[in-house]
């Protein structure tokens, strides 16, 4: 995980009944964030067991090359992927939800974004059996209103519930990796029971170089639905150079291994 609390300050605010979480990177600790992210990035693109298998058969150089060939090279793809990695880390570190799968391992092409919900996480809840977290992630050097509107539109899709594509994708991957119990739970609610709105929470996660607080506050104030909302804004002022530094370290570390 990215250990976000090690290098970011945090401010929590209530907007109506919803939660706004503002995270800002400490300029003096950006190197800590870079190191944490560089350590977890490879695992988002390749399973450790797969890398270990190549290492055992072919050696260190080939194992490192396998991972490096899965990394995006374009700035837009890298930006979006780091946003998703930060969002999945936040979910795992701070929400009590369990991330279904690390989606980036199944990208069709390293420069292409994946379809479906950016985040789909689950947790058991004694009052409703299981809760689903549907998340939309955006990464922008400077966040604008249009991007927030796009994220809100995605969260409202499929009647506010996780999309069928995301549910099937996550259940299939969980089944393949041996987490049959969670896969069965998702199958049950997708194929037999209808997911109720009280079982769903929405998370809008913005990774940006600008202050997202007002835009996220305005969005939460305008939201009139019944689904619990959490908006997370993670600000790293040198947004682009931070991303470049992360991938630069991943590549350098891979070549040294």
Image: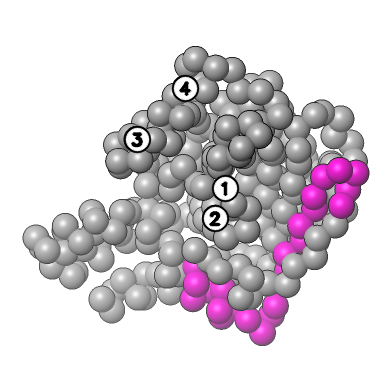
Q: Which residue is mark 4?
A: 188
| Residue at the image position 48 percent from the left and 38 percent from the top | 114
Q: Tell me the distance, in whole angstroms, between the alpha carbons under discs 1 and 3.
A: 17 Å
**Would residue 17 be counted in the magenta stretch?**
yes
Return the x and y of residue 221 as percentages of the image width and height: 90, 41
Q: Is residue 46 visible?
A: yes
Label 1 Cα neighbours within 10 Å, binned few <14 / some 14-19 / many ≥20:
some
Q: Tell me the distance, in whole angstroms, between the alpha carbons under discs 4 and 3.
A: 12 Å
N-terminal of the pair, mark 4 or mark 3, is 3
Q: What SS does tag 1 mark?
A: loop
Q: Tell me the distance, in whole angstroms, between the alpha carbons under discs 4 and 1.
A: 18 Å
Q: What SS does tag 2 mark?
A: helix
* Above or below: residue 214 compared with residue 130: below
Q: Is residue 64 left or right of residue 28?
A: left
Residue 160, picture quadrant: top right
Q: What SS does tag 4 mark?
A: helix
Quadrant where the image shows the C terminus:
bottom left
Residue 9, picture quadrant: bottom right
Return the x and y of residue 64 as percentages of the image width and height: 25, 66
Q: Is residue 157 left or right of residue 243?
A: right
Mark 1 touches mark 2? (CB < 8 Å): yes
Q: Which of the labelled discs sits on residue 92, or is there none?
A: 2
Q: Which of the labelled discs sits on residue 97, or is there none?
A: 1
Tell which tag, 4 or 2, sits nearer the viewer: 4
Q: Tell me the distance, in whole angstroms, between the alpha carbons under discs 2 and 3.
A: 20 Å
Which contiguous range is marked in magenta?
14-37
Q: Which residue is mark 3?
A: 180
**Would residue 119 be counted in the magenta stretch?**
no
Return the x and y of residue 81 as percentages of the image width and height: 51, 52
N-terminal of the pair, mark 1 or mark 3, is 1
Return the x and y of residue 255 as percentages of the image width and height: 28, 74
Label 4 Cα neighbours within 10 Å, binned few <14 / some 14-19 / many ≥20:
few
């Amino acid at each position: 995980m990215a250990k976000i609390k090690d290098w970011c300050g945090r401010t929590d605010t209530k907007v109506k009944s919803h939660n706004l979480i503002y995270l800002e990177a400490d300029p003096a600790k950006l190197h800590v964030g870079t190191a944490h992210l560089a350590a977890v990035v490879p695992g988002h693109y390749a399973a450790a067991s797969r890398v270990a298998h190549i290492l055992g058969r072919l050696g260190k150089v080939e194992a490192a090359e396998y991972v490096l060939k899965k990394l995006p090279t374009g700035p837009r793809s890298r930006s979006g992927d780091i946003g998703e990695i930060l969002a999945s880390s936040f979910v795992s570190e701070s929400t009590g939800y369990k991330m279904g799968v690390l989606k980036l391992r199944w990208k069709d092409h390293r420069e292409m974004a994946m379809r479906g919900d950016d985040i789909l996480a689950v947790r058991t809840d004694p009052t409703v059996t299981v809760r689903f977290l549907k998340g939309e992630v955006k990464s922008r050097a400077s966040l604008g209103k249009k991007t927030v509107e796009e994220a809100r539109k995605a969260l409202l899709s499929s009647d506010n519930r996780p999309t069928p594509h995301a549910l099937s994708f996550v259940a299939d991957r969980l089944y393949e990796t041996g987490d049959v119990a969670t896969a069965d739970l998702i199958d049950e609610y997708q194929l037999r029971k209808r997911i109720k709105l009280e079982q769903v929470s929405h998370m809008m996660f913005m990774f940006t170089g600008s202050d997202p607080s007002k835009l996220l506050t305005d969005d939460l104030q305008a939201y009139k639905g019944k689904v619990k909302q959490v908006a997370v804004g993670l600000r790293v002022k040198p947004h682009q150079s931070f991303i470049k530094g992360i991938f630069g370290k991943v590549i350098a570390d891979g070549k040294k291994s």
